[in-house]
Amino acid sequence: MSHLRSSNFYESLASRFLEQQGVVILDRNFAWAGGEIDIIANHKTDLVFFEVKFRKNDAHGCPSETLTRAQMQRIRNCTQLYLEQHQLHHRYYRFDVIAITQRQSQPALIAEFAPVIFENYEINWLKSAF
């Protein structure tokens, strides 16, 4: 599967998961020359900018650990453009990460941090991640 098709697959998976959690998707793949926001949505009273990260397994760390400072800055810059274009500067907003891995055979040791199993993938929703 190509990187673009792979990204679209996991962003669609994340969108379905979020919708099941009561999140209203407003936009996907909002891009400008300097960056992209995977998913933009309303969650309760917040406007949320989601970054979706996938790893086949967590042998080399959690998917969310692959998010670099440079990527976070590009997302922040892109967010400012989105807020300006949609006249949403008055809204409270946050940055969340959806970390997806293929389902592993052993359960997480700490129930508080256990991922949600959704469509045979493990999904961790990190709110206010950065």
Image (tube, grey):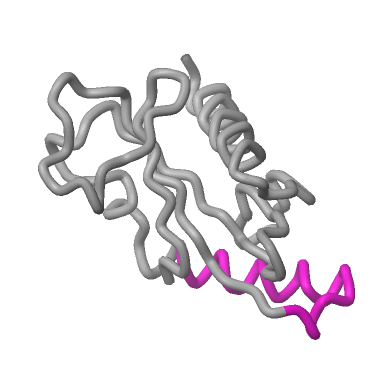
Viewer-proximal residue, 110 or 59? 110
Q: Residue at x 48, y 27 (%)?
A: 3
Q: Is 14 a magenta residue?
A: no
In the foreground, 78 or 54: 54
Q: Residue at x 32, y 40 (%)?
A: 115
Q: Which residues are magenta?
A: 72-91
The quadrant in which the C terminus is found is: bottom left
Q: Quadrant of residue 108?
A: top left
The total number of labels drawn is 0
Residue 126 x %, y %:
41, 57
Q: Which of the 4 image quadrants contains residue 77?
A: bottom right
Q: Residue at 80% across / 85% down in the picture?
A: 90
Q: Position of residue 8 (x, y in %)?
A: 59, 29
Vertically, is 45 above or below 5? below
**Which residue is the extreme one toward the top?**
1
* Left/right of residue 31 with respect to residue 65 in the rendered view: right
- Residue lying at 68% horizontally and 79% vertically, measured from the top left: 92
Q: Residue 3 or 110: which is nearer the viewer?
A: 110
Q: Position of residue 31 (x, y in %)?
A: 70, 53
